[in-house]
Amino acid sequence: MKKITNSFKETAAFGKELTAKLTGGTIVLLSGDLGAGKTALTKGIAKGFGIKNEITSPTFTLMNVYQINKKTSQIKTLVHIDTYRLKDEKELIEIGAEDYLGKDNTVCIIEWPEKISKLLQNTNVKKNKIISISIEHQPNSNQRKISLA
Ligand SMILES: Nc1ncnc2c1ncn2[C@@H]1O[C@H](COP(=O)(O)OP(=O)(O)OP(=O)(O)O)[C@@H](O)[C@H]1O
Ligand SMILES: [Mg+2]
């Protein structure tokens, strides 16, 4: 599935719509260059889950964990991981990220997933729980192509 967006707002809105498709244990792999809109999409997903906190990029913290308080949601935790500055997969393991991957009542979103491909292969995550999304810049500066597999 492909979607063209023309602004931050449209990308976030697309993320918000996606929320309905996310079941517990899902891992969303978000690929795309710097400034593609991975965090923008994550903000939309968080909004869809009713998270009121401001979503900031976990570039330095590596992982941010948000509680979902929406009564109607089976999913209780949203985990946002950004591996851009990660030097070694061990760093993520040390902060407990593995415990969240594939966990029943949790959705994990991972920016720069290619950097932890080994970790993702080694964890007990079902293939059908992985959603791969790539966001690409387009020649028009505010346009992005979002592809979902
Ligand atoms: N169609 C669009 N969708 C999303 N963001 C857009 C769009 N057009 C312009 N932008 C701008 O592009 C930037 C996207 O930033 P964002 O932090 O979401 O990227 P990112 O992919 O998470 O980058 P990084 O790898 O640095 O974390 C924002 O400044 C946003 O306003
Ligand atoms: Mg980002």
Image (cartoon, rainbow, N blue to C red):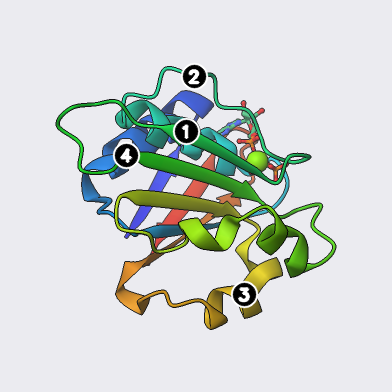
Residue with the mark numbered 3? 119
Q: Nearer the viewer, residue 52 or 146?
A: 52
Badge 1 amino acid:
Tyr
Query: Secondary structure beneath disc 1?
Result: strand
Checking the image for residue 66, the label placed there is 1
Q: Ligand 2: does it lie within 8 Å of the C-beta at label 4?
A: no
Decide: few, some or many residues near mark 1? Use Cα within 10 Å; few <14, some 14-19, many ≥20: some
Image quarter for ligand 1 equals: top right
Do the CB atoms of the residues marked 2 and 1 lie less than 8 Å apart?
yes
Q: Residue 53: give its label.
A: 2
Distance from label 2 to label 1 (Cα)?
A: 8 Å
As drawn, 56 above or below 84: above
Q: Secondary structure at mark 3?
A: helix
Q: Earlier in the sequence, mark 4 or mark 2?
A: 2
The answer to whether the residues at label 1 and label 3 have Cβ atoms under 8 Å apart is: no
Task: Classify 115 as above or below 15.
Answer: below
For marks 1 and 3, give the CA distance: 22 Å
Residue that label 4 marks? 76
Residue ID at (32%, 39%): 76
Residue 101, image x and y in percent?
47, 61
Residue 33 lies left or right of residue 129; in this view the side is: right
